[in-house]
């Protein structure tokens, strides 16, 4: 899980699904959102102690 603060968009929290040289795909509440590294102002890893299984 990561919490991403973007330059021009709201902060988003999601699970990393994949990444490449250009950006990252996050699972945000069941939908995939693509975020380019250029959009990222700050990113923090979020620790999960009790992960909810679907």
Image (spheres, grey):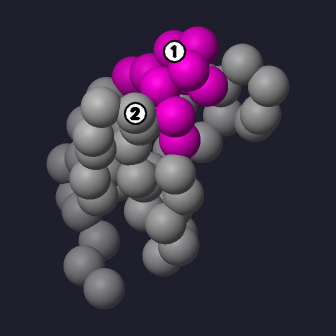
The kind of secondary structure element at disc 1 is strand
Residue 33 against residue 52 in the figure, above or below: above
Q: What's the magenta region?
A: 35-44
The kind of secondary structure element at disc 2 is loop
Any mark on residue 12, and which? none
Tell me the CA gap for discs 1 and 2: 16 Å
Q: Is residue 47 left or right of residue 43?
A: left
Of tags 1 and 2, which is closer to the observer?
2
Q: Is residue 8 left or right of residue 2?
A: right
Q: Residue at x 28, y 44 (%)?
A: 19
Residue of label 2: 22
Q: Earlier in the sequence, mark 1 or mark 2?
A: 2
Residue of label 1: 42
Question: Which residue sits furthest front?
Answer: 21
Question: Which residue sits furthest top?
Answer: 41
Task: Inspect this view and state whether residue 14 appears.
Answer: yes
Is residue 14 covered in magenta?
Answer: no
Q: Quadrant of the N terminus?
A: top left
Residue 49 against residue 27 in the figure, above or below: above
Q: Is residue 23 left or right of residue 39?
A: left
Crowd rating for badge 1 (residues with CA inside 10 Å; few <14, some 14–19, many 20+): few
Task: Name the dominant secondary structure of the magenta segment.
Answer: strand
Q: Residue at x 40, y 33 (%)?
A: 22
Name the foreground residue: 35 vs 47: 35
Q: Do the residues bearing badges 1 and 2 touch, measured as CB atoms within 8 Å?
A: no
Q: Residue at x 43, y 62 (%)?
A: 27
């Amino acid at each position: 899980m990561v919490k991403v603060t973007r330059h021009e968009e709201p902060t988003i929290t999601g699970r990393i699904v994949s990444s490449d040289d250009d950006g990252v795909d996050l699972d945000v509440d069941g939908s995939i959102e693509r975020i380019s590294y250029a959009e990222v102002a700050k990113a923090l890893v979020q620790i999960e102690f009790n992960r909810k299984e679907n």
